[in-house]
């Protein structure tokens, strides 16, 4: 299996090794269906889920050729000539998995569910409908949750863990006295209670915690803080309240809904397996060119054609461009004409989520069912078991806030990582656990991500979301960070990639119809063939 240049693993015997094996690497990195001087129907920048779905839809849909003669006419769909440009050496953007010793480690976005409608459509489409596995399984020796509140600890059952975590999140999100069941009852809706949404958008998560602090015990505050830090990956003062409320709504406005959907099921084969199937489907049409290891520098819209220039000087032309780069990377691209002022402001402010996600393998199977939450922690605030490796070791996933925030740690400090992981364990177990492996990717120092999944600061949604979703001439934007519904999640990426591909297809179809109608005013159709004004 080929290794990506990204990610790293640590083991006691080998130390730190950079670059992880993955089926997502594309070899060779380039393929062209036409000479570089010819104009593409569309160029897609970025091969995360949004870019892959957009490329697939463009390559398989949208261009109708009228064939036949006499009185028999038919439309034959051949797809758009599309170029996919990707800065990395692999598919997936902020979602990809590495396979080490037969186990799949999801470095970015992981969990999907049938309540996430757009990504679920892709799963059975590519034959993965029986590929599910469930995170957090019972039956391990250490089958409980450890809550750490400062220097205090206690172990509770998972039933009690669910009850406490759900209850405090419900209190936090119950800003209207009715759990948003009427105010925000359509999770994907964008026109509900606009005045209230704007009011809540002005608040930070810290503002809301201050409002309800007296309703919670010290331990409950710690559990709530750990949940929120896991969601937004930064200090609560920098995290907007509205995104937390949106997640509550996506969880069906019930205490355990979000966890049951968003931390429950994932693909056994890994996200890179689904990336591969979408990508290979697009390639099989004969309509897709691609260029990996090719960062884009400049996008110039000259009206009738868009010119995309790579850092190495390569140039391509297209009628339309779909740009899927993350919000925190958007300002690194040069646009001509320049982006609108509100879009530039949004890109400069960006997502606040700088969460660290870390995989760890404990020696032996004992911690299959264990979980832990707590603040302030020593760099990590939550961990939970997620299956056993083929070697029968406990695999856990842990989360921590922005390395530069209070309580954060840098991922390149493996000793600090080990200390943070051990700190979450029951005190009586801390000296007996053996760490066999750590696997992670530093998304915050990744120039093509500059953070993890999208979580927006206070007032951002009201001020900037529509601006980010707005097209810029012949350039449209399809990052998961700009979607509605599951914004920042895999489902949001698929949704917006699908929407922007459809938008481009319809725009070009309208142009073709207008041209044909113009020609018809100067000519006539004979047996389905335009004879004048061609």
Image: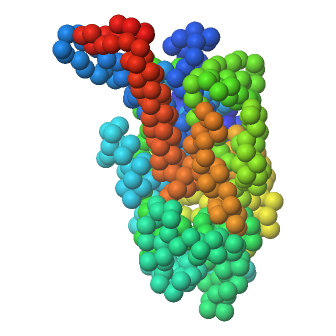
Count the marks: how many? 0
> Residue 432 at what x, y percent from top left?
64, 65
The quarter holding residue 236 reads bottom right
The quarter holding residue 311 reads top right
> Residue 341 at what x, y percent from top left?
76, 48
Q: In this picture, is 97 found above or below 245?
A: above
Q: In this picture, is 307 found above or below 432?
A: above
> Residue 372 at what x, y percent from top left?
59, 71
Residue lying furthest bottom in this view? 214
- State which quarter of the image contains the C terminus: top left
Question: Colour scheme of this structure image?
Answer: rainbow
> Residue 324 at what x, y percent from top left?
60, 39
- Is residue 350 shown left or right of residue 470? right
Residue in the picture at 70% in, 66% down: 459
* Visible residue check, residue 187: yes
- Is residue 357 shown left or right of residue 410? left
Residue lying furthest left in this view? 71
- Is residue 202 shown left or right of residue 54? right
Residue 160 versus residue 61: which sits nearer the camera? Answer: 61
Residue in the picture at 54% in, 26% down: 42
């Amino acid at each position: 299996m080929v290794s990506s240049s990204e990610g790293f693993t640590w083991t006691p015997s080998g130390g730190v090794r950079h670059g992880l094996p993955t089926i997502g690497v594309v070899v060779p990195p380039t393929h062209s269906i036409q000479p570089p001087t010819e104009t593409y129907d569309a160029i897609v920048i970025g091969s995360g889920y949004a870019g892959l779905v957009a490329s697939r839809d463009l390559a398989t849909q949208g261009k109708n050729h009228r064939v036949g003669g006499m009185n028999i006419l038919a439309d034959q769909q051949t797809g758009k000539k599309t170029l996919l440009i990707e800065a990395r050496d692999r598919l997936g953007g902020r979602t990809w998995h590495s396979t080490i010793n037969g186990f799949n480690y999801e470095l970015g976005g992981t969990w999907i569910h049938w309540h996430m409608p757009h990504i679920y459509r892709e799963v059975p489409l590519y034959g993965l409908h029986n590929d599910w596995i469930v995170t957090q399984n019972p039956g391990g020796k250490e089958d409980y949750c450890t809550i750490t509140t400062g220097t205090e600890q206690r172990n509770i059952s998972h039933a009690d863990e669910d009850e406490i975590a759900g209850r405090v999140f419900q209190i936090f999100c119950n800003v209207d006295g009715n759990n948003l069941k009427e105010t925000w009852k359509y999770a994907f809706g964008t026109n509900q209670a606009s005045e209230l949404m704007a009011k809540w958008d002005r608040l930070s998560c810290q503002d809301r915690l201050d409002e309800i602090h007296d309703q919670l015990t010290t331990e409950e505050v710690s559990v709530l803080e750990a949940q929120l830090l896991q969601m937004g990956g930064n200090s609560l003062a920098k995290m907007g309240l509205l995104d937390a409320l949106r997640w509550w709504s996506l969880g069906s406005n019930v205490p355990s809904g979000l966890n049951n959907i968003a931390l429950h099921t994932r693909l056994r084969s890994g996200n890179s397996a689904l990336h591969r199937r979408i990508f290979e489907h697009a390639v099989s049409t004969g309509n897709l060119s691609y260029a990996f290891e090719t960062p884009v520098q400049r996008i110039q819209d000259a009206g009738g054609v868009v010119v995309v220039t790579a850092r190495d000087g390569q140039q391509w032309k297209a009628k339309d461009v779909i740009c899927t780069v993350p919000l925190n990377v958007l300002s690194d691209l040069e646009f001509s004409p320049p982006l609108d002022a509100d879009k530039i402001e949004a890109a400069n402010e960006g997502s606040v989520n700088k969460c660290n996600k870390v995989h760890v393998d404990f020696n032996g199977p004992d911690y299959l069912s264990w979980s832990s939450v707590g603040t302030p922690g020593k760099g990590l605030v939550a961990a939970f078991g997620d299956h056993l490796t083929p070697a029968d070791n406990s695999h856990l996933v842990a989360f921590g806030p922005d390395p530069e925030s209070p309580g954060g740690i840098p991922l390149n400090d493996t000793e600090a990582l080990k200390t943070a992981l051990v700190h979450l364990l029951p005190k009586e177990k801390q000296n007996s656990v053996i760490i066999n492996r750590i696997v992670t990717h530093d998304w915050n120092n990744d120039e093509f991500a500059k953070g993890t999944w999208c979580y927006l600061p206070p007032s951002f949604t009201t001020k900037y979301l529509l601006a980010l979703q707005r097209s810029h001439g012949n350039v449209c934007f399809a990052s998961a960070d700009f979607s509605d519904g599951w914004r920042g999640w895999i489902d949001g990426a698929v949704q917006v990639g699908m929407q922007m591909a459809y938008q481009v297809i319809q725009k070009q179809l309208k142009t073709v119809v207008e041209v044909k109608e113009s020609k018809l005013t100067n000519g006539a159709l004979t047996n389905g063939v335009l004879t004048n004004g061609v």
